[in-house]
Image (cartoon, helix red, strand yellow):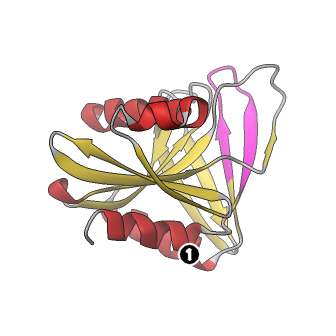
């Protein structure tokens, strides 16, 4: 689990670098596959193996906070590890210890576990259900609580999700 968290932090930094440095970030191993409405797709190498991810920022973020870091929804493929469609949320703050994150897509609800500033599904089956809901949905609402007790609600557009998901699948040979 710690390796996954560390990898996601590296990805978050890579996402930020890609956004800030554009072509310079490609020289560091991140290749932008493309932009698909509200989602962007990327490919990179991890321990010599291809890996791919897609990400989006919220279209709306609410909560009683003064400052917050970068916020992303991310879906990652790591074929060499047989990890496909892993969904994660980066909150831009540390989540309250032992708290859960509620994700709503249409009438479907999901619960993610938290650690530090990230949230994940408990297992691959939940990731698969979450990805299927994201493919069919229009928006995703994510609610979490910071270590200071602040409830945040982030709304993500799912426009372009399916095309971005197909692009990372193709780039990772799935």
Across and down, in percent, residue 53 comes to 42, 53
Decide which of 125, 100 is in the foreground and name it. Answer: 125
Residue 156 position, x and y percent, is 70, 56
| Magenta span contains residue 71 | no
What residue would you read off at disc 1? 135
Q: Quadrant of residue 52?
A: bottom left
Q: Position of residue 42 (x, y in %)?
A: 44, 51
In what element is the residue under mark 1? helix
The residue at 59%/43% (across/down) is 72
Q: Residue at x 53, y 45 (%)?
A: 89
Total number of numbered labels? Answer: 1
Q: Quadrant of residue 90?
A: top right
Q: Is residue 110 above or below residue 115?
A: below
Q: Is residue 168 left or right of residue 134?
A: left
Q: Which stretch did the figure color magenta?
A: 142-156
Q: Is residue 127 visible?
A: yes
Q: Quadrant of residue 38?
A: bottom right
Q: Position of residue 134 (x, y in %)?
A: 57, 70
Report if residue 126 is visible in the image: no
For the N terminus, the image quarter is top left
Residue 148 part of the magenta-drawn span: yes
Q: Residue at x 44, y 68 (%)?
A: 167
Magenta region's main secondary structure? Answer: strand
């Amino acid at each position: 689990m710690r390796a996954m968290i560390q990898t996601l932090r590296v990805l978050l930094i890579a996402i930020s670098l890609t956004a800030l440095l554009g072509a310079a970030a490609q020289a560091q191993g991140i290749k932008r596959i493309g932009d698909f409405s509200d989602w962007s797709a990327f490919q990179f190498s991890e321990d010599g193996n291809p890996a791919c991810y897609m990400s989006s920022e919220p279209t709306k973020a609410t909560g009683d906070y003064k400052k917050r870091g970068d916020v992303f929804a991310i879906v990652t493929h790591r074929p060499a590890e047989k990890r496909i469609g892993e969904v994660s949320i980066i909150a831009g703050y540390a989540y309250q210890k032992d708290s859960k994150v509620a994700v709503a897509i249409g009438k479907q609800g999901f619960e993610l576990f938290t650690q530090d500033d990230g949230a994940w599904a408990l297992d691959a089956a939940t990731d698969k259900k979450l990805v299927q809901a994201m493919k069919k949905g229009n928006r995703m609402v994510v609610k979490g609580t910071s270590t200071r007790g602040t409830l945040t609600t982030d709304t993500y557009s799912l426009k372009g999700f399916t095309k971005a998901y197909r692009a990372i699948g193709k780039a990772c040979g799935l």
